[in-house]
């Protein structure tokens, strides 16, 4: 899952980005509405975190522009504690959630996970899929009751497949789940991660390749 952080305060922006990386998301940071628009137009993201107070153009104006162009990605706003009207305006313009500054980073990250789950119609951070048990809040996965040890990228790919379980996920989407701008990744690398993940999952769940389209997580019943 890939998150765009739009925040002009480098300390806050970097803390948020690092926390998202630590939870297994790919995350990119930009500091203005202009660069956010470019990023969102050219790359695919699963969530955007928008600070309201940005230079030149506010986070509210950015949000309004996105929604008026039909962009439906989940948006979480960072707002000032004393501005009820900002929060009301943001929600009415299509923000999905907000946190007020100063905020606790773990809460922000938990809200991001919840928004991404909701966008994928997954109700809880704990998902049971066939013999697979996945805890997205704690990044734990077990197969038939046995804990598995996954690398950060294997985890990111599994999480993306679990959030879309039973549906085909394109290779591009898997690439964007593991790669932000600081990494260079090829489609071949994604194939390698998938193949290692298959080895670790054993017969607890199947990652099926769907020719020309991508991959789909199926439970191992073969149904
Ligand atoms: Ca700001």
Image (cartoon, helix red, strand yellow):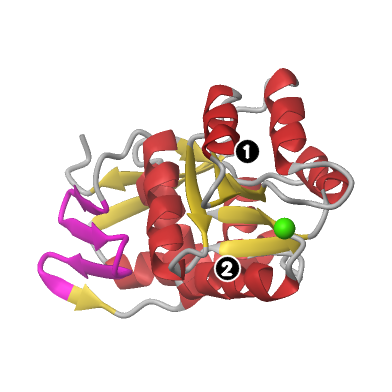
Compared with 131, 21 (above or below) is below
**Mark 1: secondary structure:** loop
**In-front residue for pair 210/99:** 99
Q: Is residue 183 visible?
A: no
Q: Quadrant of ligand 1?
A: bottom right
Identity of the residue drawn at 59% across and 28% down: 89
Examine the structure image and report whether residue 130 is included in the region drawn in magenta: yes
Examine the structure image and report whether residue 86 is included in the region drawn in magenta: no
Q: Residue 20 location in percent, x, y? A: 52, 67
Identity of the residue drawn at 20% across and 34% down: 223
Q: Which mark is residue 212?
A: 1
Q: Residue 69 location in percent, x, y? A: 75, 21
Q: Which residues are magenta?
A: 125-146
**In-front residue for pair 217/94:** 94
Q: Within the image, what quadrant is residue 101 found in?
A: bottom right
Is residue 152 left or right of 114 when viewed as pictured?
Answer: right
Question: What's the CA distance linking mark 2 and mark 1?
Answer: 36 Å
**Mark 2: secondary structure:** helix
Q: Residue 119 location in percent, x, y? A: 44, 35
Q: Is residue 33 visible?
A: yes
Bin the neighbour count of mark 1 within 10 Å (Cα to Cα): few under 14, some 14-19, many 20 and up: few
Q: Earlier in the sequence, mark 2 or mark 1?
A: 2
Single out the mark in the foreground, 2 or 1. Answer: 2
The residue that label 2 is drawn on is 16
């Amino acid at each position: 899952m890939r998150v765009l952080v739009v925040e002009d305060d480098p300390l806050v922006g970097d803390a948020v980005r690092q926390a998202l990386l630590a939870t297994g998301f790919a995350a990119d940071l930009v500091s203005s509405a202009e660069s956010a628009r470019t990023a969102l137009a050219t790359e695919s993201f699963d969530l955007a975190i928008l600070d309201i107070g940005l230079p030149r153009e506010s986070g509210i104006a950015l949000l309004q522009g996105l929604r008026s162009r039909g962009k439906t990605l989940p948006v979480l706003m960072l707002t000032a504690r004393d501005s009820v009207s900002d929060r009301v305006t943001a929600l009415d313009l299509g923000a999905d959630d907000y946190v007020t500054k100063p905020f606790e980073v773990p809460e922000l990250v938990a809200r991001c996970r919840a928004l991404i789950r909701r966008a994928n119609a997954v109700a809880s951070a704990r998902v049971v899929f066939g013999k697979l048990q996945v805890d997205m809040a704690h990044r734990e996965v077990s197969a038939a009751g046995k804990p598995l040890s996954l690398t950060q990228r294997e985890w990111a790919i599994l999480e993306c497949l679990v959030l879309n379980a039973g549906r085909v996920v394109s290779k591009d989407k898997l690439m964007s789940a593991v790669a932000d701008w600081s990494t260079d990744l090829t489609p071949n690398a994604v194939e390698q991660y998938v193949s290692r993940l298959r080895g670790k999952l054993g017969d607890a769940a199947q990652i099926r390749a769907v020719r020309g389209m991508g991959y789909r997580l199926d439970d191992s019943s073969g149904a």
